[in-house]
Amino acid sequence: MKNEHYFLGIVGQTFFFAILLIFFNLDKDSHIKITLNFLNVWLALSWLCQFYLCRKKLWSLKNISFLQKGAKTAQNEHLKKHKNDKWGDSSYANQRNSMTVQRYALQDSNFDFMVNIFIRIGYILVGPVILLIYLIQNIVVETKH
């Protein structure tokens, strides 16, 4: 399972690397002309760093907004107060609360998806810097022990 996540992480980062490589090497006629310049060398070095960084857990966002928490709390409070009602779980208020929770969850997941894409692009753009931070952090932790 861990190897599968590593492989998928490498494939995903390679995909973003290819998109950025193409984007930064397009000329005015939309032809790809890959040259040996600082940006391409930096992207290649950053892509090589992904093999180490993907072993670590890539930082990602799992967000649950205050609105979604509030809607879940309102739904739970409604269920506590109306547990013994003849309408039970099919009451209008409970259905409305459930739909609100689902709508907020969908908005949160869309936001999280976009933020995670930008985080992955950031990992490609500044991969060597992130790798350096991880290595310094490991050295500091080892010297403390």
Image (cartoon, rainbow, N blue to C red):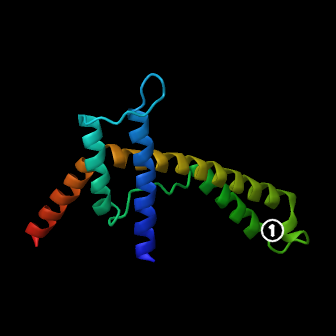
Q: Where does the image place residue 77, in percent across and percent down from the top left?
A: 70, 63
Confirm whether residue 33 shows in the render. Answer: yes
Confirm whether residue 119 shows in the render. Answer: no
User: Seen in the image, is 138 located left or right of residue 96?
Assistant: left
Identity, as a three-letter code, of the amino acid under mark 1: His
User: Seen in the image, is 102 located left or right of residue 17?
Assistant: right
Residue drawn at (42%, 50%) of the image: 120
Give the SS element for disc 1.
Answer: loop
Residue drawn at (64%, 55%) of the image: 105
User: Seen in the image, is 3 located left or right of residue 65?
Assistant: left
Residue drawn at (37%, 45%) of the image: 122
Q: Where does the image place residue 16, in percent across and percent down from the top left?
A: 44, 48
Camera-side residue: 87 or 96? Answer: 96
Q: Which residue is mark 1?
A: 82
Camera-side residue: 136 or 52? Answer: 52
Camera-side residue: 92 or 46? Answer: 46
Occupied quadrant, residue 93: bottom right
Q: Where does the image place residue 97, in percent across and percent down from the top left?
A: 75, 56
Furthest toward the bottom, the residue is 1
Q: Where does the image place residue 45, in percent across and percent down from the top left?
A: 25, 49
> Which image quarter holds the C terminus?
bottom left
**In the rendered image of this protein, does residue 124 appear above or below residue 23?**
below
**In the rendered image of this protein, does residue 11 appear above or below residue 4?**
above
Occupied quadrant, residue 7: bottom left
